[in-house]
């Protein structure tokens, strides 16, 4: 079979999809032998072939990237907590975190008003809020199990006192924190009223604290129903968008009640031990996310959750090394004690 089809009217070779123009062949032919022309033509053909295949590979890669983008977009639409890679939501853990003497100094009690607002000033996109219920069924912000540990004069549980008593209790951080803070317990209504002044609500993660030693099993059921009912009623009164809300807990009865009352609001099942067993419970409940402590936030666990269509929210970690480790696990949201440090790690200003 002849390698060269025509020397006068046009040339082509078996390696190229199209013939060369006659002008090119004639130009190449000047001053060269038939063999030289063939070698030059072959090099040109091979170059064309390489370019053609490179273009096909580029189109293939662009197609893959487009498919990945569409997949991520579809996930974000079907699960409001899921985020595309690199789009992690920065959430202030109980606001600006917990009392700490250094790295960096924080005198503000967790889930106090100043703590929550400081996290937003530091650049947080969302807030984690610790929610408990007063004796007269008013949602209040408080983290610890009893009032003994974080207030100056309070004793017992939030469920034992009406809201008027709870909001009169001053936080006690001890020395030197109390030199810099004069916070009191606040209601969720107070926080929402402040947030409603903003152009839009931040993402709100409501950590439901229900394991109170002052409640017997029968009281706990009544408490669960009242908590779900009052929480949804208050959020809807302030018209907080459902896509900005995440209810976090590990009490299945409460999560089911919240689902009936507000189906559009996302839920997160908190897991602090036995990932395998509790992950199965989370899937059975139909929640949108699993909320993992630092020890369980690993690349493997995150990948398993994402493969099942669940988002991952992590919390904890104060040091730069620990924050870097948790970011590397690729969670969708990070409830962090130090918002500034996390934003710096993510390269956000």
Image (cartoon, rainbow, N blue to C red):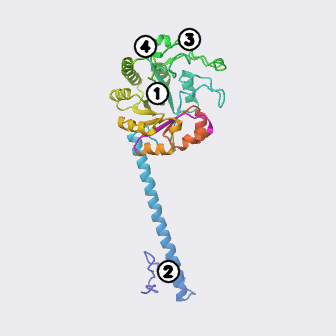
- Residue 204, percent from left and from top: 47, 29
Foreground label between 2 and 3 = 3
Residue designated by label 4: 135
- Residue 137, percent from left and from top: 41, 16
Q: Earlier in the sequence, mark 2 or mark 3?
A: 2
Q: Secondary structure at mark 1?
A: strand
Q: CA distance from mark 2 to mark 1?
A: 76 Å
Q: Secondary structure at mark 4?
A: loop
Q: Which mark is residue 23?
A: 2
Residue designated by label 3: 153
Number of residues whose C-alpha sits closer than 10 Å to that of mark 2, classed few (under 14), some (14–19) or many (20 or more): few
Number of residues whose C-alpha sits closer than 10 Å to that of mark 3, classed few (under 14), some (14–19) or many (20 or more): few
In screen coordinates, is 233 left or right of 128? left
Quadrant where the image shows the C terminus: top right
Membership of 227 in magenta stretch: no
Foreground label between 2 and 4 = 4
Q: CA distance from mark 2 to mark 3?
A: 97 Å
Determine contact: label 1, label 3, CB under 8 Å.
Answer: no
Number of residues whose C-alpha sits closer than 10 Å to that of mark 4, classed few (under 14), some (14–19) or many (20 or more): some
Q: Earlier in the sequence, mark 3 or mark 4?
A: 4
Foreground label between 2 and 1 = 1
Q: CA distance from mark 1 to mark 3?
A: 25 Å
Q: Which residues are magenta?
A: 308-320
Foreground label between 1 and 3 = 3
- Residue 80, percent from left and from top: 41, 37
Residue designated by label 1: 207
């Amino acid at each position: 079979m002849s390698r060269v089809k025509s020397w006068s009217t046009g040339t082509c070779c078996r390696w190229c999809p199209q013939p060369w123009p006659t002008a090119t062949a004639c130009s190449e032919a000047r001053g060269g032998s038939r063999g030289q022309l063939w070698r030059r033509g072959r090099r040109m053909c091979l170059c064309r072939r390489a370019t053609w295949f490179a273009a096909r590979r580029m189109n293939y890669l662009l197609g893959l990237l487009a498919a990945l983008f569409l997949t991520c977009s579809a996930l974000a639409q079907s699960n409001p907590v899921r985020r595309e890679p690199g789009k992690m939501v920065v959430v202030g853990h109980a606001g600006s975190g917990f009392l700490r003497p250094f790295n960096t100094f924080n005198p503000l009690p967790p889930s106090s008003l100043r703590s929550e607002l400081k996290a937003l000033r530091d650049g947080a996109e969302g807030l984690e809020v610790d929610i408990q219920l007063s004796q007269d069924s008013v949602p209040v912000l408080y983290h610890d199990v009893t009032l003994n540990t974080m207030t100056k004069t309070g004793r017992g549980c939030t469920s034992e006192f009406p809201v008027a008593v709870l909001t009169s209790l001053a936080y006690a951080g001890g020395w030197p924190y109390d030199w810099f803070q004069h916070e009191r317990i606040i209601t969720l209504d107070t926080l929402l009223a402040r947030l409603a002044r903003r152009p839009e609500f931040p993402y709100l993660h409501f950590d439901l604290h229900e394991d109170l030693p002052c409640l017997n099993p029968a009281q706990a059921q009544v408490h669960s129903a009242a908590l779900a009912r009052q929480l949804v009623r208050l959020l809807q009164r302030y018209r907080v968008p459902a896509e900005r809300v995440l209810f976090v807990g590990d009490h299945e009865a409460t999560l089911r009640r919240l689902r009936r009352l507000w189906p559009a609001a996302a839920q997160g099942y908190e897991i602090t031990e036995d990932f395998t067993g509790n992950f199965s419970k989370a899937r059975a409940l139909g929640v949108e996310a699993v909320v993992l402590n630092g020890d369980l936030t690993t690349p493997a666990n995150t990948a398993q959750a994402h493969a099942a269509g669940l988002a991952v929210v992590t919390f904890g970690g104060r040091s730069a090394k620990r924050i870097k480790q948790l970011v590397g696990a690729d969670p969708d949201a990070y409830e962090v004690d130090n918002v500034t440090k996390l934003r710096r790690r993510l390269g956000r200003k």
